[in-house]
């Protein structure tokens, strides 16, 4: 049995048994991403990778690591107030991190006039919105402290961090797939949306701007009714269409 068939058989079992939709999506992303973290090049240490990658290749790349399925942007349901999965008393650490990430993205988008209801399109609920990351890069990505900056080459990105202390072994990545129908690549539009939020949150002057909004929310509210407050983000988000 070939490795590709083994992977497909594993996915079928995952889908038909205990696996959740997110777990199934994460396994498909792992296969598409070559069984490794896209930010570090480190291989996953789980059974799917072990069945597909030679031990010598894994050791040459620095050994196996725990990887996670990272959402590029939160699904709009995470923005809902009163969601029991994301309540303040939630003991699930991953759910708490996702809530904090959603709150960060929501804060940036709402303050600059972006319609968060657009985050319910088909791309957001598909393989286009996930990728494989090790825990530390995943945390940086969710905290808007790491992002993927598009280059002139399709599906090729520079990996940017907000602080030089956050050093990654890779400066960039090119996403590839052996089957664009079954395993579509991460959406350039969603990556651009995440990058825009990260830049607004962390690039020079932007953090101070957001702090000013925090100190004066009663006067400014979420938006200027005229839409003027959206100008800063509008340029970064121009042309981003996540609905297709």
Image (spheres, rainbow, N blue to C red):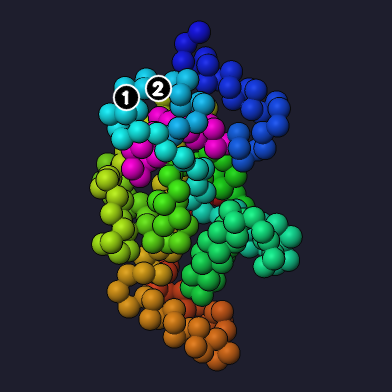
Residue for point 35% across, 33% down: 63
User: Which numbered tag is attached to residue 57?
Assistant: 1
* Relative horizontal placement of residue 65, taking residue 244 as reference (left or right): left
Q: Is residue 27 magenta?
A: yes
Confirm whether the magenta stretch covers residue 124: no
Residues packed near mark 1 inside 10 Å, few (<14), some (14 to 19) or many (20 plus): few
Q: Quadrant of residue 27?
A: top right
Q: In this figure, which residue is indicated by the disc labeled 2?
A: 53
Would you say 23 lies left or right of 64 here? right
- Residue 204 in view of the camera: yes
Residue 195 position by quadrant: bottom left
Q: Position of residue 42 (x, y in %)?
A: 36, 37
For the residue pair 75 and 137, the one nearer the viewer reads as 137
Quadrant of residue 81 within the rendered picture? bottom right
Q: Report the residue at 31% width, 35% height from top.
A: 62
Whether residue 32 is visible to the viewer of this picture, yes or no, is no
x, y percent for residue 101: 53, 61
């Amino acid at each position: 049995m070939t490795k590709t068939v083994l992977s497909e058989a594993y996915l079928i079992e995952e889908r038909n048994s205990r696996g959740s939709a997110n777990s199934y999506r994460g396994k498909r992303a792992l296969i598409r991403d070559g069984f490794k973290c896209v930010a570090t090049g480190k291989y996953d240490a789980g059974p799917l990778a072990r069945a597909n990658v030679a031990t010598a290749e894994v050791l040459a790349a620095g050994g196996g690591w725990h990887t996670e399925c990272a959402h590029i942007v939160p699904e709009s349901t995470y923005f809902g107030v009163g969601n029991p999965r994301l309540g303040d008393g939630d003991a699930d650490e991953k759910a708490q991190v996702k809530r904090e990430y959603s709150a960060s993205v929501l804060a940036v988008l709402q303050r600059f006039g972006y319609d968060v209801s657009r985050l319910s399109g088909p791309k957001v609920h598909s393989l286009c919105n996930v990728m494989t990351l090790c825990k530390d890069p995943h945390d940086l990505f969710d905290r808007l402290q790491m992002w993927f900056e598009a280059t002139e080459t399709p599906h090729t990105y520079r990996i940017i961090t907000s602080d030089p202390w956050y050093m990654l072994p890779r400066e960039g990545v090119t996403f590839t797939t052996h089957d664009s129908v079954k395993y579509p690549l991460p959406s350039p539009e969603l990556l651009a949306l995440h990058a825009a939020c990260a830049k607004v949150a962390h690039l020079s002057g932007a953090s101070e701007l957001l702090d000013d909004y925090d100190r004066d929310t009663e006067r400014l509210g979420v938006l200027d009714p005229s839409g003027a407050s959206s100008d800063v983000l509008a340029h970064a988000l121009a042309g981003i269409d996540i609905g297709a």
